[in-house]
Amino acid sequence: MTSGAERQGRFVSPPGLRHRFEVEIGAGEVDSVYAVWVRMADRDGRDVGPLAFVIRAHEHESYLDFFASLARHFGTRTPLNRMPSLRPGCSVEYVPLLTENLGTGIRYGYGDPAVLRFDGWYYLVVTSNDAPDAFPILRSRDLHEWEPRGFLFPEGQTPGWAATGEGIADYWAPEIHKVGDGFRACFVARRKDDLELCIGLASASHPEGPWLADAGPILDGNQIDPHLFVASDGGTYLYWKEDNNGVWPDLLSRFLHGRPEFVERLFDVEADIRTASLMAALWPWIGGLSPMERFFMQQPLIEAVRTRFAEFRNRLAELTGTEDIVNRLRTPFCVQRLSEDGKQLVGQAQLVLENDHPWESHVIEGMWVVERSGQFYMFYAGNDFSTDDYGIGLAVSDSPTGPFRKMAGPLLGSSAEWSGPGHPSVASDPAGRDVMFLHAYRPGAAAYGEFRALLMVEFEFRDGVFVVRGSEASQR
């Protein structure tokens, strides 16, 4: 994979588009990584530019600022989190537990929080992205006072198969569970050979480690968000998500570059037509970026799709040569039983859930399963993590392998104080009552690599109905 700096040049929309973009990308100055000149010409003779822009850093926020500036001058789509929120807000009162980084080595807060209660302590492990120390571990007696206890994989001790390095590594969605006489951790990392997202496992005799990763990933092929569930009968199950939402934007941009005549058959909002035309021009450059930068660069196109997701999917399915893209618009959850030693998958993987409710749009992710009174409840996140539309849903089954029946959703969503609540985990509080842990951003600060706080929601199931204690929020 080459860097964008090595692929500087001039890129032009393919012939046949109503809006023709010319984009020149060069090396940035001291305060930026890219200098970008953009011109747009219409069939009716209107000509805008060339105008100069910069992308300040290889970070999500910098790309969002860049696209917001483009939208003002060229009428392309403005990123949703650069627009005022129109959502009324969730009425649930979230309890903030951690609102700043504690200790050295914790860079990004407490995304994808997983909590284990063991021996009088609560152990929290969280996503670390590309930080040198992977997966911070913290502990607390009372859920309010927390202390750092090291890392699942301190610098220099990451799994041998996993990539490291700023802007390259992505260490996501860790969990720690008591399995048999020891502890097992599951996590996501990029394989160093091809930067493909994979799921790994590790073992320890105590939640604080030391942790020893298995020799290789247990699942590859862009699988993410693992969840280990130990049922009351002793069976251990691994759930995961196929990361199709990380694949289809590339396929779509490539398709539009090669078949520009379909832009206006797929999109009918003017800002989205212009955005798709721009992406068609930039695909030869975008295709050579690192995985996360490709996501940053294509976010306006992703938002154009997700805003009218069902309609877009139907239109796309009517076109020839789009079967793979249409299929990748599904984000399936799968489950498979683990062997008694927790090191191998046994039997066959089973599909248990996928994005098929309007509020979820193009993605579901970050599941957590609990067993209560013979029922299996799956909490999960849905929609775009960097917008106010991100939230938490709930599904229920008579078996850990499904089928799961979704309840009306979203269950929890953005509030006036917190944006994009997601990736729930569940433990019991000191009084033995159910508590959900989740991450969220401060309003206006939702972006990859930005700080995420640890929040708590107290809840219970009353005759199978989810009820937040201290509020009227519930779901059947």
Image (cartoon, rainbow, N blue to C red):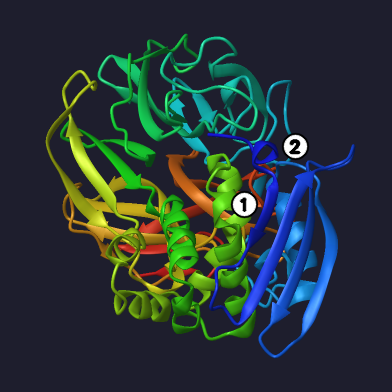
Q: Which residue is mark 1?
A: 296
Q: Mark 1 belongs to which amino acid?
A: Phe
Is residue 449 toward the left or the right of residue 192 in the image? Answer: right
Mark 2 belongs to which amino acid? Answer: Glu
N-terminal of the two: label 2 or label 1?
2
> Which of the two discs, 2 and 1, sits closer to the camera?
1
Q: Position of residue 325 (x, y in %)?
A: 35, 62
Above or below, comparing residue 29 to residue 47 in the picture? above
In the picture of the structure, the residue carrying the numbered disc 2 is 100
- Asked if 19 appears above or below 58 in the picture, the reply is below
Spot occupied by residue 336 in the image (x, y as percentages of width and height) = 19, 39
Q: Residue at x 60, y 13 (%)?
A: 155
- Kindly give the residue lying farthest to the right in the view shown: 30
Look at the image and tell me whether residue 444 can be seen: no
Q: Position of residue 192 (x, y in %)?
A: 46, 23
Q: Is residue 430 left or right of residue 200?
A: right
User: The residue tagged with tag 1: helix, strand or loop?
Assistant: helix
Report if residue 13 is visible in the image. Answer: yes
Q: Describe residue 327's horizontal placement relative to residue 84 as left or right.
A: left
Front residue of 475/203: it is 203
